[in-house]
Every structure is written in C-alpha cells, then in structure tokens.
Amino acid sequence: MKDMYLPEMQKKFRHPDVTLNGAERASVPLIEAKTLWFNTGTLCNIECANCYIESSPKNDSLVYISPDEVSEYLDQIKERKWATNEIAFTGGEPFLNPDMIEIARRCLERNYKVLILTNAMLPMMRKSVQNGLLDLRLKYNERLTLRVSLDHYTAKLHDTERGKGSYNITLNGMKWLRDKEFKMAIAGRTVWGDSDIDSRLGYAKLFNDNKFEIDANDPNVTVLFPEIDEKIDVPEITTECWGILNKSPKDVMCASSRMVVKRKGAKKPSVVACTLLPYSRRLRSIKPAIVAEARKVRFIRALPASHCSKPCSIVLGFIKASGSVVGLRPQISVA
C-alpha cells in the first residue's frame, strides 16, 4: 500500500517556493541561534533497524570532528555576539570520537550548557571515558546533560530496534550515570503506536523502579520522536498552515539551531540547517556564500519531504529552511 503513494509524492516538493498546486511554500528563517549542534561522526557501535542517519560500525560518511574545529566555531559565536547558550553533540555514537571529552570540556569552559546524545553502551562505559566524564561532572555538573537513547520503556521493543540485549546494556549505563549523579534525559520513539500518555506512563514507571531522576512528563527531558518514514505520502506545507495549525516559524527547530558536520574527504566542516538531514544532497545546496555584513545564506532548494515532515513540530509535511544560516566561517559551506 505504501508504494501507491510514491508516484504522487514524487510530483511534490519540486519547486523551492511553491507547492504542486501553486501555493506559496512555508519557510523558516534562523531567528536566534540558541543551540549549535555538532555531529561527532557517523560511526556507531551498533546498527539500528531504522537510523535516520544510517550510523553503523562501518559508516564513516561523516568523520570525527576535532577539538580545534569545534573551538573555531565557538570563537565565531563570541565574535558575532550570538545568544547561543547550548552546544549539543550527536552521532553516530559521540563517545566513539576519541576527542569527545576534550571537546565537551572546551565548550563547558566557555560556560555553555552541553548536551551529549549517547546510547550509554560500551563506548561510554570505557574507563577512559568514565574518568573523563567524572572530571567534567565534578567541575561542570549543572551544565552537562547526557540524553540517552532508550527507544522504548520495554526491553522487547527497544531490542527490536537496537538488537537483542541492548536494552540491558543501556540500562546498566544509565545506572552508572545515576550512581555518579549525572543529569540525564531520554530520547524515545513512537514507532510502536503508543499514545503520548501511555508512553510517558511507561517511562515514568521505569524511571521510578530504577530511581532515575528523569521527568517522564517533561517533553524537553523525555523526548519522544516521531518515526521517519520515507515511503509515506505527506502534504506540502504552505504559508496558510501556520494559522491553520496555530504554529509559528519560531516554534520549529531550524529557527533556533544549526548543525556542523564534517563530510568524509572534506578539508573543513560545513553547516547544515537541519540536524535530521546532515547529508541530503538537496540540503547541500549552498556554496560558501556569506553576503557582506549580513552573513546570510538562503536555502534555495526543497528538503526531502518524507524526512522533514514528521520530525518538524508542524508534523504535517515539508518546511523549507531559509534565511540567516550560520554565517560561520569554514566556510559556511553547506555543500
């Protein structure tokens, strides 16, 4: 049945400014860069059944980013007097990057909040990483959060996505973080059809049973991500949708964040508008084009609808990102 949608979907999202029926396409400017994300590399210790970035022990499409490369972007934030208050890291598995502790340290030393996404499995549990984390916690505990990927509150469904036994390994990692008094958050998924209420009740029981100080009812702490399915048909979002859905462009993630990636073979990192589309060819449409003092980059191509639709807070379909991208120097290549 899903394949029936594909011919119709292929007609959509062709023009950067108008939809298939000629309506003006919605767009999202960078309003305020509150969070700068870094992808630390696509290598991961496991291979999930449905990973949006196809991370695995073999995928090095995005290579490890270095402490000095991160520092250069931090310098630019300071130079431009941006209101950025959080630096976040995703992968792959960030703790496979041998410089992850040093990278986090440099951000924390500059008084940023730091968020690290991790599966809390073996890479995080290596002694060298544990010792590094403990040192960071001792000095910067209030500003360091580890968001653990726990796809479901039951072992059966979590392991369906991540492999048999992965649930217990992650839970052991979480218990270590609990015992060492780290701040934790959770990244869950909604692929199995649980309602939001049921999901949060399930996570709340798990947290209570294990004495995890994690708020299951706070959507910023227990983040439940919608599933990304490239095969389903999704509507195109027009400017009228903001009013219909009672949403504002500022509510969308790409209005307040950007992500730095380093592609295999590239001399320098580059910046992309959406953390969920790090190597989409359609997204990589911008050459190093910083416009004079405004330092603006305009995204002139459509994003792949099927990927962008569900994760967006609008949930219904496509949003074109445009406007002030990170005019961050090296060199703001989104190419």
Image (cartoon, grey):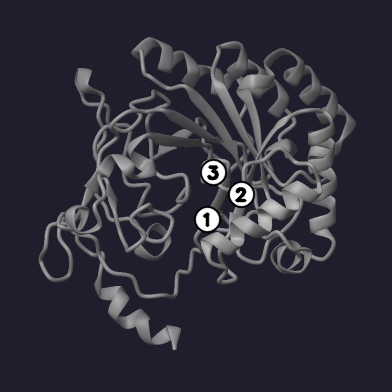
The structure residue drawn at horizontal position 53% and vertical position 42%, both measured from the top left corner, is 263
Out of 81 and 64, give the one closest to the viewer: 81
Left or right of residue 33, residue 227 in this image: right
Residue 204 versus residue 66 in the image, above or below: below
**First in sequence: mark 2 vs mark 3:** 2
- Mark 2 burial class by Cα count in 10 Å: few <14, some 14-19, many 20+: many
Q: Which residue is mark 1?
A: 225
Amino acid type, label 3: Asp
The structure residue drawn at horizontal position 55% and vertical position 71%, both measured from the top left corner, is 193
Q: Callout 1: helix, strand or loop? A: strand
Left or right of residue 118, residue 270 in this image: left
| Percent position of residue 171, x then y | 81, 49
Q: Which residue is mark 2?
A: 187
Marks 2 and 3, how far apart at CA: 12 Å
Residue 16 versus residue 88 in the image, above or below: below
**CB contact under 8 Å: marks 1 and 2:** yes
| Percent position of residue 267, x then y | 52, 31
Q: Which residue is mark 3?
A: 218
Left or right of residue 45, residue 24 in this image: left
Q: Callout 2: helix, strand or loop? A: strand
Residue 22 falls in image quadrant: bottom left
| Percent position of residue 118, x then y | 69, 42
Q: Please identify the quadrant where the C terminus is shown.
A: top left
| Percent position of residue 245, x then y | 25, 57
Marks 1 and 3, how far apart at CA: 13 Å
Out of 31 and 231, give the one closest to the viewer: 31
